[in-house]
Structures are given as C-alpha cells and as structure tokens.
Image: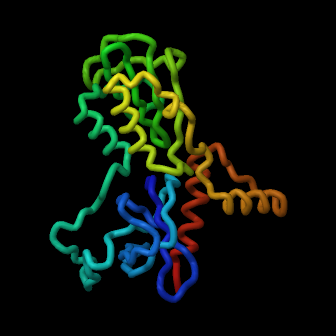
Amino acid sequence: MSYIVAFVRLPGTSKEYPVCCLRTDIKPEDAVIVELIGNRFEIGRVSTVKYLDWDCNASLVCKVGEGEITSRGVQLAPGTPRSVGIVSGEMLIARLRERGWTPYHSLVTYRMVLAFNNEIQTARILVRRHGVDFQVLPDLQALPVAFSKASVAKTEGRFVQHFLAHTTFNLYEGAIRFAEAFERNEGNYDRFFVSVGERDRRTAEQKAAAKACREDSGFYWRGSDDDGMEQGMNAWYSEMLARD
C-alpha cells in the first residue's frame, strides 16, 4: 500500500497517473522518474500529491537530477534516498520505539500497539493497516512486556480512530506530534482526538462512477469490502497505465 500517492503527467498524454510515493519532499511540478507496469521507466511531472492509501501499480523512483534512465533501469546518484520522512506504519513504529514507546501485539485488529507512561497517565498509539488510533487512559498502568500479546479495551479512557485515506496532512507525522505532546505531559490533547480521514478510500470521481454503474447496469461496488475495492482500483490503474 502507498499512503502518499503522486499523480504524474507523462509525455504525450494529458492523463494523470497515480504512483506510489515514499517521499514527503515531493511536491507539485517536480520532475520525476517513475516506474510503470512491465519495468518501464519514464520522466513525468507531478500534478498533485494526495494521502489516499492506495495499492498503486506504478512507483516514483526519484526526482530528475537524482538518477538517469539506462538500458538496465535507473542509475541513482550516490546518496539519493529511496524514501524521505515517515511514509508507512513500519516507519512510525520504528520512530516510536526510538522515542521509548513500548511495542506489543493486540489480540485483534492492530498491527502493533505502542504504549508510553508519562508522569500521570498512559497513552497508546494503535497502528492499523489503514489507520492509526490514539488512546489516553485515565491513570498510569503497567506497560506490557515488549512484543508480548495483550488485550486492548477501546472503552477505557479517551479513544479516537483515524483513517489514512483522504487526510489533509501526514497522519504518521501527526502521531509523532501526539507522542511528543504526551511525553511532555501537556495535558490537553483535544486537537488529537478529532477523527481525520475516511474509511472509504475511493476518490469522489470513483464514487460517482461507481454510482453511475450501479444505476445504469446493476453493477455493485463493494465499498465496505477492502478486497473488492482494491480489485476495482487495480483494474483502473491497469487501464490507465497500459499506454499505447
């Protein structure tokens, strides 16, 4: 999955192609090298960058000037990063562990739960495949042994669920800001407990197209089913990227 999706214009077409972007420093109008289906490489220009949490079939390799396309692929200049910033759940987990948060496994739902005790309370950052949740407990609790399994009661204390898709900022970086505020015993965490993102990862255009298909031909988009939704997205990517 790619949390950050760059829409890139390629030469000879007015279409914008969604590509996996593992860099937070990519911005509109950047000239980039992208890898398309079939190990094809092309230079394009970024139109927009969005937080969509999609399974893209194309990927952004580097900025123009950081590498060149050769017969053997892309030759990167020394020191060119493959990723910049916090762009995945794995990176978020690694950063929180560096800050002293204790990682453990929940019995259901979460990829990893990370807990921390400040002077008066316990907080949890709960990492899901398609989101990150925050929880602040009313008092101090003993932390589980690292990487052990423990239950998580969402009804305890204060809890909020955030979704990756359609956020207006990098949710992973937002989780670090929450961690920093809690570590310094800030006390007021209201701004972190306003749910962001959407469960439905389709764009407005995809939703409208799906609605039109249902009305015109009885087609049913399984919007609540991740597998069905990703199959539909992949079919869309394949059609867009299969250029003449």
Residue 138: percent from the left, percent from the top?
Answer: 45, 12
- Up-down relation of residue 199 to residue 211 (above or below): above
Q: Nearer the viewer, residue 211 or 96?
A: 96
Q: Residue at x 50, y 16 (%)?
A: 157
Residue at position x 45%, y 75% in the image: 29
Question: How is the model colour-coded?
Answer: rainbow
Q: Position of residue 91 (x, y in %)?
A: 31, 45
Above or below for 152 versus 27: above
Question: In the current view of this chain or complex, which residue is farthest to the bottom?
Answer: 12
Q: Quadrant of residue 225?
A: top right
Which residue is at 33% across, 33% downward? Answer: 180
Picture residue at 31% right of the left edge, 19% below the top: 118
Viewed as shown, does residue 172 lie left or right of 163? left
- Say which of 214 and 27 sits in front: 27
Q: Between 9 and 169, which is closer to the camera in this rendering?
A: 169
Q: Quadrant of residue 73?
A: bottom left
